[in-house]
Image: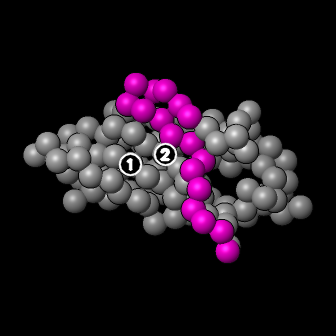
Amino acid sequence: QVQLVESGGGLVQAGGSLRLSCAASGDIFRINAMGWYRQAPGKQRELVATITLGGSTDYADFVKGRFTLSRDNAKNTVYLQMNSLKPEDTAVYYCNVDVLGPTAVVYNRWGQGTQVTVSS
């Protein structure tokens, strides 16, 4: 079993910043890719950013230059620094990880989601 604990969401004014964290624990040999997705009301879940084990990142166009994704492999934690937030960034943000378990099985896990609300 792998547990993901997300934190850092909240209410912020447009132009403000938030930092999301997602810590993984449990039956983990190694975490490969980590990332964040988001889902706004009435919309499909969409990719925000991903980071590989080696630290290579990929961002959705709508967050490039504003959001920064990083990870601490020793803590099995991924961080999403969100700057210059816009009202259209309002959504539930979900952490996602690809885990290599101790029995060499690879599986994917989602966090429970954390609400980010940006007021205009």
Residue at 23% x, 47% y: name it: 106
- Residue 67 location in percent, x, y? 67, 39
Does the magenta run of residues contain 104? Answer: no
Looking at the image, the residue that sits furthest to the bottom is 42
Query: What whole-number distance in Å separates the C-alpha atoms at marks 1 and 2?
Result: 6 Å
Residue 81 visible in the picture: no
Of the residues shown, which amino acid type is indicated by label 1? Val
Q: How many marks?
A: 2
- Residue 46 location in percent, x, y? 59, 56
Measured along the vertical axis of the image, is residue 58 above or below residue 34? Answer: above
The residue singled out by tag 1 in the image is: 97
- Residue 85 location in percent, x, y? 78, 49
Q: Earlier in the sequence, mark 1 or mark 2?
A: 2
Residue at 78% x, 58% y: name it: 88
- Residue 25 location in percent, x, y? 30, 51
Tell me where the magenta segment starts and ends, as one range. Answer: 42-58
**Labelled disc at residue 35:** 2
Does the magenta run of residues contain 56? Answer: yes
- Dots 1, 2 in contact, CB < 8 A: yes
